[in-house]
C-alpha cells in the first residue's frame, strides 16, 4: 500500500518581490507541514508550477492542468500535478506593481496573478489527480458547503495498492466518488494514450530515430507549446523502452530558470516550452523533436546507430500495419470494411507490442550469457557481452553493441538477471514465444494477430476491470470560474488538516499489516543461442575439408611426422581465418592435452605455438567466439624441456596479442570459472546430503548455474543461520581462490620471457584496442598495461620502467574490481594485495632460467644465409642479421591485383657493407619456390631510418626497422628473435656512422681498396712540377690575394689522415691547405703554364677549356696573349679562387672587361657568382650567361637608380657603371647588335632567320617557331601553374615576337627584381620570374618517394585514387614543368639572336638546371655521351653545384637533408629523351645510371661542392693511371667508358641526329610522365647499376641452366612483376642479335669483336648500299624501311618503356601545311632534316616493291569485286593490297609461301564490264581461291609472270 498523495501545496505569486525583473512564486501553504520520514518534500516546486516564469496578466486566464516530474537524489521520481488558475490582485499591490513597471495608474482588479494547487505523489495517476484538483477548485469557486480542510486531509490519508490489479473506490468527503485501478504488474509501465499520440505527432521514422537515440545515450529535447504534451511524449518514450529503464536525466518539463541544464555533458530526455526554441539553437549535440511541427532535427556531428536489418524493416512494417491498416488494402478493387484503426488506448498498446517483440528479438538468449558469481546472501550477476555478440553473430551491429554498453542494459541485467523472482510479459515472451516470432516473420496476418494478443495483455495490465463504476466528480458551474470578481482562495486551517492526518495515521498503525504473497518463481532461460545461430545461418562455417586438414596436421605433429605437418602448415594457417577451424584447433589440442601428451619436443612446440598465434591473431579483441578463452588453459599445459629442471610453457610465446591486455576478457574468464565452481559447490552439497541418486540425475540433466541458483534462492529462507553462514563463506572462498589463480595466470601472460627488457610500450592504453594491436615491439605488454594504469590514476609512476611493478598494478586493478563486485571481505582483499607481488616475483625468477636456457637452443631448421656478392674493395661491416623483409605499399611483390606469387614477405638476412645495405633471402611462402629475393641500396642514399611496429603474426620477431633510400628503395625489415637488441642497436649505429661520416674521406669512394693496397713504390722526384704541385703552390699563394682571414683556417682532413702508413702518405702530399706558409718561389699561373707543358695540357683538357675552344669562345693562348680579335677571352682572375670559391679557375668574360672590373662586379651578386659566359650560339652568336641573383644594392644600382642625380659618384654608382659596361660588352659581342646603338630592331634579321628546331610532338595546330619575350612573359612564368596556351608549355602570345627586341635578357627572381624599371635606352631587359626554392624541392621529393614507394599497403579500391591524388600533391611534375618552361623560353631567345643571363637564387641550383637544359636543347653535341659528360663536368661540377651539401654526404650536412636538384635535372632530360628518342646517343638507362650513382658515393665524381674543395683534397687532376686496381674506378666516367666498350647498355640504337637541331619539348603536365626509375624494381638481382654484381649473377644463372641439357627445355618464359629484369629476360632485337653473334664467335673459337665495331660496320654498309641505290642516307640503321621514322622509333621506344608512356602523337596527313619550321639557310647540301621525319609520311616503299599496280579483287563469298592497289614484295615474300596508292595502312596480305598456282581464268559473276576476258587470273593458295582482274591482258600477264618469278626465286 502507498499514499495516493504525499503533499498538497498551494503556490502563489510572490507580490513582495515584484520589483525584480522576473516575477517569482512562493509556497503559501503545504500539507503536511512536516516531511514524511520515508519521503522528504521535493524542493523547487514553485519553479515547475510556472515553467515559463511567474508573471502578472491583464486578463483572466482559464485554468490549466499538467503533470511535471521531479527526480530526487535517490533517483526516485515525484509526479507534481499542477492545477493553475488566475486570481485578482488587490489595488494597492497593483499600484505598486504598476509603479515598478512604469505602467501608470492601474484600476482595481485590472491585474491577475497565477495561483497553483499542487499534488505531489510517487504514483502516476494523472486522471485521478486532475479530477481531485478540479474538485477542490470547484468547492472554492462555487462556494460549496464542504470543508476544504476535510477534503485535503482525506486526500493526504488515502492509501491504495501499488500493483496487483486491485480496484479501489475513494471519496474525499465532498459527495464525490472515484475508482482507482492499479496495474497488475508494476514493472510494466502505464502509458494511457501517450504512445499513440507521439506517433501521431512525429511519425514512424522520427519516433524510431528518437528510440535509437535514447537507447544509445544521446541527448533528446522535446519542444511543444503544451506542457502536458511534453509530459506525455516523455512518458511515451519511457514506455517504448520497456523492459529497459532510462537512468539518466529525465525532466519532461524544464523551467525557464533551469535552461542551463541543457548544457550538461550527460545524456538526457528533457521537454522545453517552444517559446524557448531560439535559446536552444546553439546546442550542437542535442537531438530536437518539435512535437507541434512533427519534425526531428539531428545535428550533423551526431551519428545515431539505427536498428540493423532486417529488424528495422520488420519493425517499420509492423508499425505501418498497426497505424495505417488501410494501406495494405488501399489498392484493392473491393477493400474490406473491417480494416480500421483501433481505439486510441488499444492502438497505444498495439504500438508498444511491436516494440516488445523488437526487444525480444534483440535480447533473445541473453540469459544464456549471464554469469552468476554469488548466490548468497544476494545474487551477483554479470553479463558476458562478447559471448552474446559472437554467438548471435552480431559483432558488427553498431546499435546492439552500444545498447549492451549502456547504463539502461546494465540496470536491466541487475534487475532481470536474478534467477528467482516474479516474471512478467517480457520474460514469458523471451521464454516461450521466440520460435513463434521467428516463424511468423514473413506472414503479416500472423504478425498482426500476435501483436494484438500482446496488446490485449498490456491493456489488461493497465485496465484490469474495464467495466468500472461511473465516476462522480464535481465540476464548476458554467462560467463561474471565469468571473472577474472572486474571493481569493481561502487560507486553510493547518491544525484541522494535521488532526485528520494524525487520526488516520494512528488508525493505520493499529490495523494488522497487510501481507501480500509474492509470486516468485524460477525465471525461464528460453532457447539456447547456438540453436538460434544455426537456424538463422549466421554462423561462419568452414568446409569439412578444411577442418579435416586441421585435424590431420595436429595428428601429424603429435605423431612426430614433422615433414607431413610442414606440408600442411600453410593450408592450416589459411584455414584458421575461419571460426570453425579455430574452434576445431582448440578442441583437438584439448584432447591431446587430456591424454598427457602436453610435453613436446622443440619442433612440435614451435608448430603448436605457431598455430596458437595464428588463431589468436585472427580472433578479434572481443574474443566473441571464446577462442582465447579456450586457448588460455592450453598455454599453461603444453611445454617443452629446456634442461634439467627447466621447462618452457607455451604462454611465454603467445603473449603478443591484445586480448591479454583487455580487462573485460579477464573479468569474463574469471566470472565463468567462479560460476562453474559455485555450481559444483551446490551439486556437491546435494551429494553430501544423501540424495546421491538425485545428484546424479541433476548432473545428467545438466542443470545450468542459473537454475541451481534459483533453487537455492527458493530454499534460502528455510535454511538455518549456521547453514547460511557456511554457504556464504564457501562462496567467498571460491572467489578468493580463483583470484589467486588468475593472478598467476595473468602474470604468465603479462610478464615477458626476457624481463630484463625495460622497453615499454607507451603508445596506447588498454582501452584503445586498435592502437595497442599495432604497437607491439617486444614480447611484453606490460608497458601498455602501465600506461593504462598511470593514465587512469592521473599520476606518472616514477618506476614505470619496471615491468614487474607494471604487471602488479594491472593485476591489483583486476583483483580490486572483481573482488569488490563479488563481495570479498576487506581482510581477504588486503591479503591478496600482499600476495600478488610475491607471485609476480616468483614467476620472474622462473622465467629467468627459462630465458637463459632458451637462448642456448639452436634455431630450428632456419634457412642458411645467402651471402651477397661484393664489389672489388667492398667489405662487410656487419655479418648477416636474420630478418624478414616485410611487404610495403607496392602490391606487385605480394601477388596483388596484378597477379603473381607472393614474393614478400621473405626470410633471409640483412648485410651491412662499406658501400651498401643488402637484404638477401627467399620468400616465406613455401609455395612460391626457391626464388632468391634481393633488395639493396647504397648507404649514401639513406634518407630516413625509423623503428616500426610489427603485425602480431610475426611471432618470431621482436623489432622492426624501416630504411628508406632516395634511390626509391625501401627496406622494411623485422629482426628475428635470435637477433638481440644490442645487435640491432649496433647495426643502427654502424648505419649512421657510414651514412654520415665525420669527414669526406670516410666516404666509400675514398676508403675503397685501401686495405688491398699494401705497398706503394717510393715516390720519385719529378723533373717538371705536376699540376698537383702547381695547385698546391697556387692555393698557398691565395693568402697573398685573399687576405689574412684564411691564415687560421684548419685543414679539411680528419686526424687519422696524418697518422696513416706510408701508402697514405703519398696521397697526403697531394693535400692542399691554404693554412700553410706561402712559398716565396710560388709560381704564377701564366709562368707555370709556359714552363710546364704537362701542366698546361692538364688545364686544356679540363671540360671548360675543351668546350670553350669548341664553341669559339677563346683559347688559352688567346687569353694569355690578350688578343683583341676575339670578343671573349679566358680570364684567370679566379685562378686563386679569390673572387669566387664556387667558380672554376678559368672563366669566359668579354674581351674588353678587365679583371679588376670583374672583382668589383662580383660584390653585387650572391656568393660573388658574377655573370660569366657558358655557351654561344654558333648561328646567331648570342651567348648564354649564368650568375647568381643580385644583392639588393646591386639591383638598386643597376635598375632602380639609373637617372638619379648625384653630386658625388658613390661606390654603388661606380659598381652599377661597371655592370653596365659588362652588359654592353656582351651586347657588342653580337654581330647583329654591335653596329647599332640604342634599342636594336631586328626586322631585317628576323625576315630571313628562321628556327631549325622541332617540337616534341607532331601536332598540326598553332606552331609558332619563333617568338621572343613580351612584357608579361615573366608574370605568366611566375604564376603558380605556369600554364600557357601553347601545347608545349611555352609562351604563346601572338605578339611574342616583337620587332624591337632587347639584345640581352636578364632572368631573375621576381622578388629581387620587383619594381626594377630599366632605362628604355638600354639594350637589356628584365624577365622577373617566380621559381620554387630548394626547400620546396626537398618537400616535393619526400612526397614523391611516398607516392612511388609507399610504406603501407592500401586497399585496392582507394590505391589508384590515392596514388594520383598524392602525386598531384607532391608537385614534382609541376616543378619539372616550370623548369622546362623556362628552358624553352631561353632557347627561343637565344635562337632568335638575343643573349640571355640566367641569374636565379645562388646560381648553383635552378640556374644550373636551366642553363644545362638550354645547352642540351640547343646544341646537339651535348646530346652525345661525350657531350653530356662534358656538360655535367662544366655546368655542375666546375661551376660548383653543392653535391655534398644537397646530398648530405657528411655529418656536417646531415641537418640539411637530401635535396635532389641534380636528379630533377636528369628527370627533365628523361622527359626530353622521351619526346625525342632519336636525338640522343645515350639511352634512358644511362640517365638512370647517373641518377643512381650520383648519390651512391661509389665514385668520387659527385663529391664535394666545388673545384676549390676538390683541389684542396687533391682529387681534381687524378690521372687515369693512378687507379689502385683495374676494378676500382675513381670517376663514374671511366667506369661508363669501360662498360660502354663491353655492352651497348648505354647506347640508343635509334640515334639519328640532325646537325644544328634545336629541340622544343612539350612541358605541360599532361605531356610529362613519371620516370620508371622511381617505380621499377628487380627483386631477383637488386639494382642493376652495379654492373659487376648483376653481370656475375647472370653468368652463374646461365651456367646453372646449362647443366642439365637432357631434360626437355621449354622456350616459354614466365616474367613476374617486380621480380624479373624484363630487359634481360626479353632483350630488344638488336641486343639479342649482338649477343647471339658474340656467342657464335666464342663457340667457333674466334676473337670476340666489340659490339660498337660491329654496329658501326653494319651502319656503314647500310649507308653504302643506300648511296648506290640513290636513296636518302640516314644516320640511323633502323631506318631501313619506308615506315615513318618517328612513328617507328616511338613504337620501339614505347615497348621498352612500358605501360603508360604513350606519346602525344597526332599523325595527320595535313601536318606539312601547319606551320612546319623550315630549314635555315645554313642547312645546305640537300640532306633531308630529321624534322621532316617527325612531321611527314613516306608513302612509298619502293625498296621493297618489286611490282605494284591496280587490280580488281573478288571478295569472299557473296561479296562484290573491288578495286585495290596491290604491291608485290620480294623481300617479305608477300602480296599486299591497299585502298589506294598513297594509303599507308595495309588492308591485307597474301603469303606467297602458301601459293600453289597462278593461272589465267575466265570472268566470273559480277566482274567489271568492258574488260578483256584475258585480263582475269586466279591465285590458288592452301586456304582459298583469289580472283583478280587487271586493266588489260598485258598487265594480267605481267602480274602472273612476276608472281611466278617470286615463287621460283623462293
Image (cartoon, grey):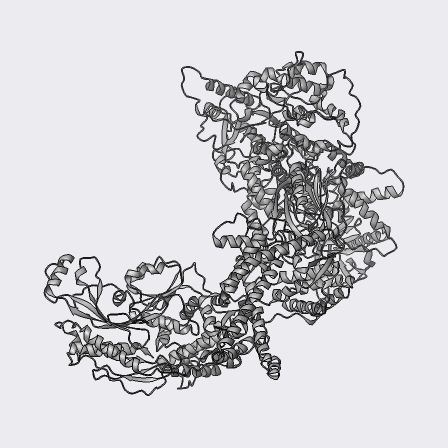
Count of numbered circles on the image: 0
Which residue occupies the foreground of this view, 218 or 1612? 218
Q: Quadrant of the N terminus?
A: bottom left
Residue 108's place in the image compared with 1784, above or below, is: below
Which residue occupies the foreground of this view, 1034 or 645? 645
Q: Position of residue 944 (x, y in %)?
A: 61, 42
Task: Find residue 1647 and report its image quarter.
Answer: top right
Q: Position of residue 1187 (x, y in %)?
A: 56, 27
Residue 710's place in the image compared with 271, above or below, is: below
Q: Residue furthest right?
A: 1645
Residue 398 showing in the rendered view: no
Q: Position of residue 1565 (x, y in %)?
A: 56, 44
Which residue occupies the foreground of this view, 1192 or 1697? 1192
Residue 523's place in the image compared with 1736, above or below, is: below
Q: Residue furthest front?
A: 722
Task: Find residue 1583 and report its image quarter.
Answer: top right
Does residue 331 appear to the left or right of 1175 in the view shown? left
Amino acid at each position: 500500500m502507498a499514499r495516493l498523495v504525499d503533499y498538497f501545496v498551494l503556490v502563489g505569486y510572490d507580490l513582495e518581490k515584484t520589483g525584480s525583473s522576473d516575477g517569482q512564486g512562493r509556497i503559501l501553504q503545504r500539507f503536511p507541514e512536516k516531511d514524511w520520514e520515508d519521503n522528504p518534500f521535493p524542493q523547487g516546486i514553485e519553479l515547475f508550477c510556472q515553467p515559463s516564469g511567474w508573471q502578472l496578466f491583464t486578463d483572466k486566464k482559464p485554468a490549466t492542468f499538467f503533470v511535471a516530474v521531479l527526480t530526487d537524489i535517490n533517483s526516485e521520481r515525484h509526479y507534481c500535478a499542477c492545477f493553475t488558475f488566475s486570481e485578482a490582485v488587490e489595488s494597492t499591490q497593483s499600484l505598486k506593481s504598476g509603479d515598478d513597471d512604469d505602467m501608470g495608474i492601474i484600476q482595481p482588479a485590472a491585474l491577475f496573478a497565477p495561483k497553483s494547487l499542487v499534488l505531489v505523489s510517487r504514483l502516476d495517476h494523472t486522471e485521478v489527480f486532475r479530477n481531485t484538483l478540479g474538485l477542490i477548485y470547484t468547492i472554492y469557486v462555487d462556494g460549496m458547503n464542504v470543508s476544504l480542510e476535510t477534503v485535503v486531509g482525506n486526500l493526504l490519508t488515502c492509501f491504495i495498492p501499488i500493483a496487483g490489479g486491485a480496484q479501489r473506490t475513494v471519496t474525499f468527503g465532498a459527495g464525490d466518488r472515484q475508482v482507482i485501478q492499479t496495474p497488475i504488474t508494476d514493472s510494466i509501465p502505464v502509458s494511457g494514450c501517450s504512445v499513440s499520440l507521439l506517433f501521431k505527432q512525429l511519425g514512424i521514422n522520427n519516433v524510431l530515430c528518437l528510440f535509437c537515440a535514447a537507447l544509445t545515450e544521446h541527448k533528446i529535447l522535446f519542444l511543444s507549446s503544451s506542457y502536458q504534451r511534453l509530459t506525455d511524449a516523455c512518458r511515451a518514450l519511457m514506455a517504448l523502452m520497456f523492459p529497459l529503464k532510462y537512468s539518466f536525466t529525465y525532466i519532461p518539463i524544464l523551467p525557464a530558470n533551469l535552461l542551463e541544464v541543457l548544457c550538461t555533458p550527460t545524456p538526457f530526455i528533457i521537454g522545453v516550452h517552444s517559446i524557448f526554441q531560439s535559446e536552444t539553437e546553439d546546442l550542437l549535440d542535442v537531438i530536437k523533436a518539435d512535437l507541434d511541427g512533427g519534425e526531428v532535427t539531428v545535428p550533423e556531428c551526431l551519428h545515431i546507430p539505427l536498428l540493423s536489418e532486417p529488424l528495422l524493416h520488420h519493425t517499420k512494417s509492423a508499425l505501418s500495419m498497426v497505424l495505417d491498416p488501410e494501406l495494405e488494402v488501399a489498392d484493392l478493387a473491393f477493400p474490406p470494411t473491417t480494416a480500421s484503426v483501433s481505439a486510441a488506448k488499444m492502438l497505444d498498446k498495439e504500438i508498444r507490442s511491436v516494440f516488445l517483440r523488437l526487444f525480444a528479438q534483440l535480447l533473445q538468449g541473453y540469459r544464456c550469457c549471464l554469469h552468476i558469481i554469488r548466490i548468497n546472501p544476494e545474487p551477483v550477476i554479470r553479463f558476458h557481452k562478447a559471448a552474446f555478440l559472437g554467438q548471435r553473430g552480431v559483432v558488427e551491429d553498431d546499435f546492439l553493441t552500444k545498447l549492451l554498453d549502456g547504463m539502461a542494459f546494465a540496470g536491466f541485467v541487475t534487475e532481470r538477471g536474478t534467477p528467482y523472482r516474479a516474471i512478467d510479459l517480457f520474460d514469458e515472451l523471451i521464454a516461450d514465444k521466440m520460435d513463434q516470432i521467428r516463424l511468423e516473420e514473413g506472414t503479416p496476418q500472423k504478425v498482426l494477430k500476435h501483436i494484438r494478443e500482446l496488446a490485449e495483455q498490456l491493456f489488461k495490465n493497465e485496465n484490469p476491470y474495464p467495466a468500472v463504476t461511473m465516476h462522480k466528480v464535481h465540476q464548476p458551474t458554467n462560467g463561474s470560474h471565469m468571473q472577474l470578481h472572486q474571493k481569493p482562495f481561502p487560507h486553510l486551517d493547518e491544525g484541522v488538516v494535521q488532526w485528520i492526518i494524525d487520526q488516520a495515521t494512528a488508525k493505520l498503525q493499529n490495523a494488522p499489516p497487510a501481507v501480500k504473497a509474492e509470486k516468485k518463481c524460477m525465471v525461464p532461460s528460453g532457447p539456447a543461442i547456438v540453436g538460434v545461430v544455426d537456424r538463422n545461418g549466421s554462423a561462419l562455417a568452414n568446409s569439412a575439408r578444411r577442418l579435416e586438414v586441421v585435424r590431420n596436421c595436429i595428428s601429424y605433429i603429435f605423431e612426430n611426422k614433422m615433414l607431413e605437418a610442414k606440408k600442411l602448415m600453410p593450408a592450416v594457417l589459411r584455414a584458421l581465418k575461419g571460426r570453425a577451424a579455430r574452434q576445431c584447433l582448440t578442441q583437438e589440442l584439448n584432447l591431446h592435452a587430456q591424454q598427457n601428451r602436453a610435453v613436446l619436443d622443440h619442433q612440435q612446440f614451435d608448430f603448436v605455438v605457431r598455430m596458437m598465434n595464428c588463431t589468436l591473431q585472427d580472433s578479434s579483441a572481443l574474443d566473441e567466439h571464446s577462442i582465447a578463452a579456450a586457448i588460455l588453459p592450453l598455454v599453461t599445459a603444453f611445454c617443452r624441456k629446456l634442461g634439467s629442471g627447466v621447462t618452457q610453457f607455451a604462454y611465454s610465446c603467445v603473449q603478443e596479442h591484445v586480448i591479454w591486455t583487455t580487462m573485460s576478457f579477464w573479468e569474463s574468464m574469471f566470472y565463468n570459472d567462479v560460476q562453474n565452481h559455485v555450481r559444483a559447490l551446490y551439486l556437491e552439497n546435494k551429494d553430501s546430503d544423501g540424495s546421491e541418486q538425485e545428484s546424479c540425475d541433476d548432473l545428467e540433466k545438466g542443470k545450468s548455474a542459473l537454475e541451481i541458483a534459483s533453487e537455492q534462492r527458493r530454499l534460502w529462507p528455510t535454511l538455518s543461520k549456521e547453514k547460511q553462514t557456511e554457504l556464504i563463506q564457501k562462496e567467498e572462498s571460491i572467489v578468493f581462490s580463483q583470484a589467486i589463480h588468475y593472478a598467476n595466470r595473468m602474470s604468465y601472460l603479462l610478464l615477458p620471457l626476457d624481463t630484463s627488457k625495460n622497453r615499454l610500450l607507451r603508445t596506447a592504453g588498454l582501452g584503445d584496442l586498435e592502437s595497442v594491436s599495432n604497437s607491439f615491439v617486444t614480447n611484453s605488454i606490460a608497458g601498455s598495461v602501465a600506461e593504462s594504469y598511470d593514465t587512469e590514476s592521473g599520476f606518472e609512476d616514477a618506476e614505470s620502467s619496471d615491468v614487474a611493478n607494471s604487471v602488479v598494478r594491472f593485476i591489483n586493478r583486476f583483483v580490486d574490481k572483481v573482488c569488490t563486485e563479488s563481495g570479498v571481505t576487506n581482510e581477504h582483499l588486503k591479503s591478496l594485495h600482499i600476495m600478488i607481488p610475491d607471485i609476480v616475483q616468483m614467476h620472474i625468477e622462473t622465467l629467468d632460467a627459462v630465458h637463459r636456457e632458451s637462448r642456448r637452443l639452436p634455431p630450428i631448421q632456419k634457412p642458411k644465409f645467402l651471402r651477397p656478392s661484393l664489389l672489388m674493395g667492398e667489405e662487410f661491416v656487419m655479418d648477416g642479421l636474420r630478418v624478414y623483409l616485410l611487404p610495403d605499399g607496392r602490391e606487385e611483390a605480394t601477388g596483388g591485383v596484378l597477379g603473381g606469387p607472393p614474393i614478400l614477405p621473405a626470410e633471409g638476412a640483412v648485410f651491412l657493407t662499406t658501400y651498401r645495405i643488402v637484404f638477401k633471402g627467399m620468400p616465406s611462402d613455401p609455395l612460391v619456390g626457391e626464388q632468391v629475393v634481393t633488395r639493396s641500396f647504397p648507404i649514401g642514399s639513406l634518407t630516413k631510418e625509423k623503428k616500426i611496429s610489427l603485425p602480431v603474426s610475426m611471432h618470431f620477431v621482436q623489432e622492426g626497422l624501416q630504411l628508406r633510400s632516395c634511390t626509391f628503395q625501401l627496406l622494411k625489415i623485422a629482426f628475428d628473435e635470435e637477433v638481440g637488441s644490442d645487435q640491432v642497436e649496433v647495426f643502427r649505429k654502424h648505419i649512421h656512422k657510414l651514412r654520415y661520416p665525420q669527414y669526406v674521406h670516410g666516404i666509400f669512394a675514398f676508403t675503397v681498396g685501401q686495405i688491398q693496397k699494401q705497398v706503394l713504390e717510393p715516390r720519385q722526384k719529378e723533373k717538371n712540377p705536376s699540376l698537383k704541385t702547381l695547385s698546391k703552390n697556387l692555393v698557398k699563394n691565395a693568402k697573398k690575394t685573399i687576405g689574412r682571414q684564411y691564415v687560421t683556417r684548419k685543414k679539411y682532413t680528419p686526424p687519422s689522415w696524418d697518422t696513416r702508413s706510408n701508402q697514405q702518405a703519398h696521397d697526403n702530399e697531394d693535400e692542399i691547405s691554404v693554412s700553410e706558409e706561402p712559398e716565396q718561389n710560388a709560381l704564377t699561373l701564366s709562368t707555370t703554364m709556359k714552363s710546364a707543358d704537362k701542366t698546361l695540357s692538364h688545364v686544356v683538357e679540363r671540360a671548360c677549356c675543351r668546350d670553350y675552344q669548341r664553341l669559339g669562345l677563346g683559347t688559352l693562348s688567346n687569353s694569355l696573349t690578350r688578343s683583341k680579335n676575339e670578343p671573349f677571352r679566358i680570364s684567370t682572375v679566379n685562378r686563386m679562387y679569390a673572387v669566387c670559391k664556387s667558380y672554376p679557375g678559368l672563366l669566359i668574360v668579354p674581351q674588353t672587361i678587365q679583371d679588376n672590373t670583374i672583382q668589383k662586379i662580383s660584390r653585387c651578386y650572391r656568393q660573388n657568382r658574377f655573370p660569366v659566359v657558358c655557351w654561344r650560339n654558333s648561328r646567331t652568336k648570342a651567348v648564354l650567361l649564368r650568375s647568381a641573383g643580385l644583392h639588393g644594392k646591386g639591383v638598386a644600382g643597376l635598375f632602380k637608380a639609373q637617372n638619379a642625380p648625384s653630386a658625388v659618384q658613390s661606390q654603388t654608382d661606380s659598381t652599377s657603371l661597371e655592370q653596365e659596361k659588362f652588359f654592353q660588352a656582351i651586347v657588342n659581342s653580337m654581330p647583329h647588335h654591335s653596329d647599332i646603338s640604342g634599342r636594336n630592331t631586328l626586322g631585317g634579321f628576323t625576315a630571313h632567320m628562321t628556327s631549325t628546331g622541332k617540337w616534341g610532338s607532331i601536332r598540326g595546330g598553332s606552331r609558332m617557331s619563333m617568338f621572343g619575350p613580351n612584357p608579361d612573359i615573366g608574370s605568366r612564368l611566375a604564376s603558380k601553374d605556369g600554364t600557357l596556351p601553347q601545347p608545349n608549355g611555352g609562351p604563346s602570345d601572338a605578339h611574342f615576337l616583337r620587332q624591337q627586341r632587347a639584345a640581352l635578357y636578364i632572368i631573375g627572381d621576381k622578388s629581387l627584381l620587383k619594381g626594377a624599371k630599366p632605362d628604355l635606352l638600354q639594350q637589356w631587359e628584365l624577365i622577373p620570374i617566380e621559381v620554387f626554392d630548394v626547400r620546396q624541392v626537398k618537400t616535393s621529393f619526400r612526397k614523391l618517394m611516398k607516392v612511388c614507394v609507399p610504406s603501407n599497403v592500401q586497399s585496392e579500391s582507394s590505391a589508384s585514387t590515392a596514388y594520383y591524388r598524392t602525386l598531384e600533391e607532391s608537385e614534382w611534375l609541376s616543378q619539372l614543368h616550370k623548369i622546362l618552361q623556362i628552358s624553352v623560353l631561353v632557347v627561343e631567345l637565344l635562337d632568335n639572336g638575343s643573349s640571355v643571363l640566367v641569374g636565379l637564387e645562388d646560381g648553383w641550383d635552378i640556374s644550373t638546371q636551366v642553363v644545362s637544359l638550354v645547352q642540351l636543347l640547343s646544341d646537339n653535341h651535348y646530346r652525345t655521351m661525350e657531350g653530356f659528360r662534358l656538360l655535367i663536368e662544366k655546368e655542375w661540377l666546375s661551376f660548383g653545384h653543392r653535391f655534398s651539401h644537397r646530398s648530405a654526404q657528411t655529418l656536417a650536412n646531415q641537418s640539411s637533408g637530401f635535396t635532389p636538384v641534380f636528379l630533377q635535372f636528369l628527370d627533365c632530360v628523361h622527359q626530353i629523351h622521351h619526346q625525342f628518342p632519336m636525338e640522343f646517343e645515350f639511352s634512358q638507362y644511362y640517365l638512370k645510371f647517373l641518377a643512381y650513382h650520383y648519390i651512391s658515393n661509389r665514385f668520387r665524381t659527385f663529391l664535394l661542392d666545388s673545384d676549390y674543395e676538390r683541389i684542396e683534397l687533391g682529387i681534381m687532376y687524378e690521372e687515369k693511371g693512378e687507379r689502385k686496381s683495374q676494378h676500382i674506378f675513381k670517376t663514374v666516367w671511366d667506369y661508363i667508358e669501360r662498360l660502354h666498350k663491353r655492352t651497348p647498355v648505354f647506347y640508343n640504337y635509334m640515334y639519328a641526329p640532325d646537325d644544328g637541331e634545336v629541340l622544343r619539348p612539350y612541358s605541360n603536365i599532361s605531356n610529362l610522365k613519371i620516370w620508371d626509375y622511381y617505380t621499377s624494381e628487380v627483386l631477383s638481382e637488386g639494382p642493376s647499376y652495379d654492373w659487376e654484381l648483376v653481370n656475375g649473377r647472370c653468368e652463374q644463372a646461365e651456367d646453372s641452366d646449362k647443366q642439365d641439357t637432357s631434360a626437355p627445355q621449354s622456350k616459354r618464359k614466365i616474367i613476374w612483376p617486380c621480380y624479373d629484369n624484363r630487359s634481360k629476360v626479353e632483350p630488344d632485337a638488336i641486343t639479342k642479335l649482338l649477343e647471339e653473334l658474340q656467342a657464335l664467335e666464342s663457340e667457333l673459337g674466334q676473337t670476340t669483336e666489340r659490339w660498337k665495331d660491329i654496329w658501326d660496320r653494319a651502319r656503314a654498309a647500310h649507308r653504302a648500299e643506300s648511296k648506290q641505290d640513290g636513296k636518302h642516307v640516314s644516320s640511323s640503321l633502323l631506318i631501313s624501311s619506308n615506315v615513318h621514322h618517328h612513328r617507328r622509333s616511338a613504337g620501339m621506344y614505347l615497348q621498352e618503356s612500358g605501360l603508360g608512356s604513350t606519346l602525344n602523337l597526332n599523325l595527320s596527313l595535313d601536318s606539312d601545311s601547319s606551320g612546319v619550321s623550315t630549314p635555315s639557310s645554313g642547312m645546305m647540301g640537300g640532306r633531308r632534316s630529321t624534322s621532316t621525319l617527325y612531321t611527314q609520311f613516306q608513302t612509298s616503299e619502293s625498296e621493297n616493291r618489286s611490282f605494284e599496280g591496280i587490280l580488281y579483287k573478288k571478295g569472299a563469298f557473296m561479296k562484290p569485286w573491288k578495286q585495290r592497289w596491290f604491291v608485290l614484295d620480294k623481300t617479305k615474300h608477300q602480296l599486299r593490297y591497299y585502298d589506294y596508292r598513297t594509303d599507308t595502312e595495309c588492308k591485307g596480305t597474301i603469303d606467297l609461301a602458301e601459293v600453289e598456282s597462278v593461272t589465267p581464268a575466265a570472268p566470273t559473276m559480277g566482274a567489271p564490264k568492258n574488260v578483256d576476258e584475258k585480263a582475269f587470273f586466279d591465285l590458288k593458295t592452301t586456304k582459298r581461291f583469289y580472283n583478280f582482274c587487271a586493266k588489260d591482258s598485258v598487265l594480267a600477264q605481267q602480274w602472273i609472270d612476276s608472281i611466278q618469278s617470286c615463287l621460283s626465286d623462293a
